């Protein structure tokens, strides 16, 4: 019955919905059917690691654009997104239509295990190639990993400008950061941090020397960027390595003492990946929401209001890939949305690497 | 009576064993239990038992649990004695204040300590200015034990005070008349009388030590102190994808701790059956006079209030009202109300407050009704089932926060007919009530065990049915236990977060998980502001309750 009604709505869609609901610019005419289908479905469920506060501007705008599609937004951490979705799917219960998470490896693992629906998004062509995986998963943001520091307490001449410089500083002036004055992401507690570690290892030959320099009480390790930033601004730590840039920029608005360095040798860039779930109960609404995240309209909000750093090359703004590329060029090293990331999920490799971390950065 | 007793026990067993059973089952598989390729395997046990970190975490957790029990139980008992039985000055202020640590999330308490006495906390900086260095180190095992102990004093207090209120005052009065000093009265008369309450709360606090997460994560982890819950946290990530089977093994290890613990509890209480105290006559008498000791007692309590509540709460308050804090910042120059403005704009706030309020008032009352039914169902029941219930009751607490929410999600997902409860307030309520079963039930059991059988026998002799004797005699006699139970549930339900994470959804948000999610996102200024709102609301509610005559 429901399906029949849906079919009817899709059939009627071009004539009924067109006047009220203009197509986004450049979309094919038959996209009207997706909009009508989504309105028929009435809502879209999103499990996301982007906190409600940051996502709020986007959600409000989506509501203004499609008032008939209510967003059921679940603000979770990346493990919760994974657990909740997987359990619900296994039980054949209602689950999210879109998963949107910065844990790129966990997202791709779900994609690899067949949990993503295939969809030709009209926005795909506008996205950089490295950020799209086979019409199944899409990067949405372009967020640099930066060095954050306390301008009040860290002398200006002691601010490192690159990974190599940070290592040199730790070796030359170990007393500067002794007793826990340095902080970074904890790869033992955060899968995201572990992924960063595998990337750093790739681009920085002396990464393990750096890890060793964090040891003997110099480094303190947290599972989230927010905690690192709070403790850097308070002065408990002077400097944070591999802090997500979007959070730093957000905090800089409130705290002029928070400094930010884009490392001169290379800058890792992460992207929050989104995909439509395979058995989405509201597939049209899922497509609509995904396309919205990728649209120029949403990306402009990311670049200007939400400080999530937009990904599209044709979107300008203070927090955009375009602006970063202009400034940093090919020093930017985006973490590509491809199955290469899954290699780091192999238990044997992981355990060995975590052991190495314990022996270096966690050495007493 | 059996028509009431047996079904109650059966329902209890089902509610407890469903989530626990699922987790135990999971521990013997090599993949998630819902996966088609899951096979029976002992590999998870091999892995965990072969991990040196597991053994280290287990031993540390034992020490933490023992340490915090050794601090919380004596102090909580003495505090209850002083507040309930003596003429201690300032009681009406002390009582509501000491409940703060129960309302605040442990994560928030730990963060409050960081802002107050962390390396750049305001108290640390002030002292550094004065004497040139900071004489303490917040990040250590010792401070973890002390803070965990001191912040769990209120739990013991609630248990003991509910028991002490109903004690026959004549006994203490007589001891005083015979010339015993107050401390001697406490030790030789009141202590044995409050024994069941102390045993129950001691066992519960010790076991809570296995479940602590926020405090060890924030205070212990920087000093490389690894406990079972922080180890569990690492396990979610160690193999790349969350490995339920490994986590399940840790839960089984924790669940096994309940066996000797409940055995010990039963042994300690067997000795207590001699101390039945609520006899036929109850005479209202004056509180015990402490004489000059009252000021010494007050000073000690104020000192505790300062360390266990003043410090973390002032840290949270400060963070809520400043834009920046820490070394080199004068907080008076960064005062702001902006954090509350930002908080007010949070999309889930209003729903969160309403739902939390509903759960904490109506939900807690419903939980008390359930707990009271269980307590009465096993009351004076000479049956092996009672021993079984003793063991069952503690089991749900062996699910640490990280696992509890997931286990209940699974129950709602995979047990037929329970699906409707998922993402509903009723489902949240059920999960909360099961997880906190031991605490709610035992506060009632402790008061029940004080009632002399002759009261119920009198009712029976005059022709009342067993049910009627329960309703008209026993129930009114344990009203302090019921009120204490409701109060405890009220506060625990306000702050509970872990069970809610997987069960709430749009429209059914509650504040506990919201605080933790804000914490994870690093919006600590919002966490602080929300906690202040939380404490404010609870304080207002308590003030109102006290005004209309509810006694804590």
Image: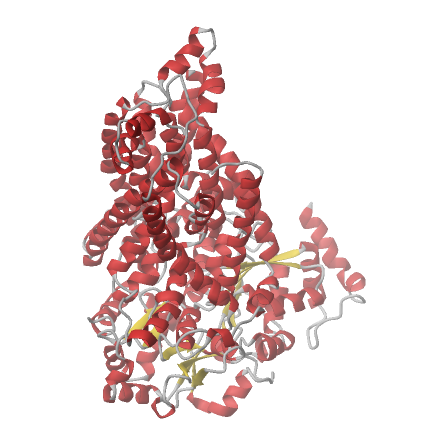
Colour mode?
A: secondary structure
Residue positioned 40% across, 34% down in the render: B162
| Residue under the point 31% across and 25% down | B174
Q: Nearer the viewer, residue B114 or A148?
A: B114
Relative to residue A185, is residue A216 drawn left or right? left
Left or right of B104 in this view: A2: right
Residue B513 location in percent, x, y?
Answer: 48, 54
Q: Residue at x 80, y 61 (%)?
A: A16
Q: Nearer the viewer, residue B328 or B61?
A: B328
Residue B511, x across and y down, in percent: 52, 53
Q: Is residue B301 above or below residue B488?
A: below
**Picture quadrant of residue B199:** top left
Q: Residue at x 46, y 90 (%)?
A: A328
**Residue A292 image point, x, y percent:** 62, 70
Quarter holding the N terminus of chain B is: top left
Query: Residue A225 or B408: which is nearer the viewer?
Result: A225
Q: Is residue B156 above or below residue A83?
A: above
Q: How many marks?
A: 0
Tell me if residue B382 comes above or below residue A357 in the rendering: above
Can residue B37 be seen here? The reply is: no
């Amino acid at each position: 019955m429901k399906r029949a009604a849906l079919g009817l709505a899709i059939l009627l869609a071009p004539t009924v919905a067109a006047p009220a609901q203009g197509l986004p610019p450049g979309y094919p005419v038959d996209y009207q059917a997706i909009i009508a289908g989504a309105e028929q479905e009435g809502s879209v469920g999103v499990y996301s690691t982007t906190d409600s506060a940051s996502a709020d501007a986007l959600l409000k705008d989506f509501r203004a654009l499609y008032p008939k599609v209510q967003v059921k937004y679940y603000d979770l951490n990346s493990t919760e997104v994974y657990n909740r979705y997987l359990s619900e799917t296994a039980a054949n219960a209602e689950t999210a239509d879109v998963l949107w998470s910065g844990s790129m490896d966990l997202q791709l693992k779900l994609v690899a295990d067949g949990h993503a629906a295939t969809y030709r998004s009209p926005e795909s062509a506008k996205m950089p190639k490295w950020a799209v995986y086979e019409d199944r998963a899409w990067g949405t943001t372009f967020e640099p990993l930066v060095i954050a520091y306390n301008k009040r307490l860290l002398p200006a001449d002691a601010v490192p400008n690159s990974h190599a410089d940070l290592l040199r500083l730790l070796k030359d002036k170990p007393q500067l950061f002794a007793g826990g004055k340095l902080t970074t992401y904890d790869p033992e507690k955060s899968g995201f941090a572990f992924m960063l570690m595998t990337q750093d290892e790739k681009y920085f030959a002396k990464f393990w020397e750096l890890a060793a320099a964090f040891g003997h009480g110099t480094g303190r390790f947290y599972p989230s960027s927010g905690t690192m930033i709070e403790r850097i601004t308070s002065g408990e730590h002077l400097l944070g390595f591999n802090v997500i840039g979007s959070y730093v920029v957000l905090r800089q608005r409130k705290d002029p003492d928070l400094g930010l360095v884009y490392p001169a040798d290379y800058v890792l860039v992460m992207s929050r990946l989104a995909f439509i779930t395979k058995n989405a109960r509201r597939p049209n609404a899922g497509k609509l929401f995904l396309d919205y995240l990728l649209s120029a309209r949403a990306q402009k909000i990311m670049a200007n209001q939400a400080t999530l750093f937009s990904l599209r090359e044709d979107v300008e703004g203070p927090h955009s890939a375009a602006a970063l590329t202009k400034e940093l060029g090919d020093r930017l090293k985006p973490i590509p949305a491809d199955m290469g990331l899954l290699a780091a999920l192999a238990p044997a490799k992981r355990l060995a690497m975590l052991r190495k971390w314990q022996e270096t950065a966690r050495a007493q | 009576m059996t028509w009431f007793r047996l079904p109650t026990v059966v329902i209890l067993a089902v509610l407890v064993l469903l989530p626990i059973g699922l987790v135990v089952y999971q521990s013997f598989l090599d993949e998630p239990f819902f996966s088609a390729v899951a096979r029976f395997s002992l590999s998870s046990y091999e892995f965990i038992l072969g991990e040196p970190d597991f053994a280290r975490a287990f031993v540390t957790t034992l020490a933490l649990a023992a340490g915090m029990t050794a601090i919380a139980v004596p102090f909580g008992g003495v505090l209850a004695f002083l507040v309930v039985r003596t003429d201690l000055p300032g009681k009406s202020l002390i009582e509501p204040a000491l409940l703060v640590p129960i309302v605040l999330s442990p994560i928030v308490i730990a963060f409050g300590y960081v802002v107050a006495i962390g390396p750049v906390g305001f108290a640390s900086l002030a002292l550094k200015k004065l004497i040139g260095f900071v004489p303490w180190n917040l990040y250590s095992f010792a401070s973890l034990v002390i803070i965990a102990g001191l912040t769990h004093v209120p739990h013991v207090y609630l248990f003991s005070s509910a028991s002490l209120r109903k004690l026959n005052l004549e006994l203490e009065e007589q001891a005083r008349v015979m010339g015993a000093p107050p401390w001697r009265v406490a030790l030789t008369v009141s202590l044995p009388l409050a024994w069941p309450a102390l045993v129950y709360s001691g066992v519960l606090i010790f076991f809570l030590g296995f479940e602590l997460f926020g405090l060890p994560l924030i205070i212990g982890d920087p000093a490389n102190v690894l406990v079972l819950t922080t180890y569990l946290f690492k396990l979610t990530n160690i193999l790349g994808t969350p490995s339920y089977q490994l986590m399940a093994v840790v839960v089984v290890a924790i669940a096994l701790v309940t066996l000797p613990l409940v055995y010990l509890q039963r042994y300690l209480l067997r000795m207590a059956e001699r101390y039945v105290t609520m006899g036929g006559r109850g005479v209202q008498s004056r509180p015990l006079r402490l004489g000059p000791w009252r000021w010494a007692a007050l000073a000690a309590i104020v000192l505790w209030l300062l360390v266990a509540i003043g410090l973390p709460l002032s840290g949270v308050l400060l963070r809520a009202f400043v834009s920046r804090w820490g070394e080199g910042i004068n907080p008076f120059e960064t005062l702001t109300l902006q954090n509350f403005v930002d908080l007010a704009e949070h999309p889930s706030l209003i729903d969160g407050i309403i739902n939390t309020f509903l759960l904490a008032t109506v939900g807690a009352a419903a939980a008390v009704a359930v707990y009271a039914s269980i307590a009465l169902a096993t009351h004076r029941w000479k049956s092996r089932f009672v021993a079984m219930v003793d063991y069952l009751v503690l089991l749900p607490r062996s699910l640490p926060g990280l696992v509890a929410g997931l286990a209940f999600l699974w129950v709602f997902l995979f047990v037929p007919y329970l699906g409707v409860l998922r993402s509903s307030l009723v489902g949240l309520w059920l999960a909360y009530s099961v997880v906190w079963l031991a605490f709610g039930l035992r506060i009632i059991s402790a008061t029940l065990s004080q009632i002399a059988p002759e009261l119920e026998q009198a009712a029976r002799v005059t022709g009342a049915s067993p049910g009627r004797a329960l309703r008209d005699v026993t129930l009114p006699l344990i009203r302090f236990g019921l009120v204490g139970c409701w109060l405890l549930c009220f506060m625990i339900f306000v702050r509970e977060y872990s069970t809610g994470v997987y069960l709430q959804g749009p429209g059914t948000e509650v504040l506990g998980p919201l605080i933790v999610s804000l914490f994870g996102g690093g919006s600590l200024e919002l966490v602080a502001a929300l906690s202040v709102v939380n404490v404010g609301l609870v304080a207002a509610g308590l003030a109102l309750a006290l005004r209309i005559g509810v006694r804590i």
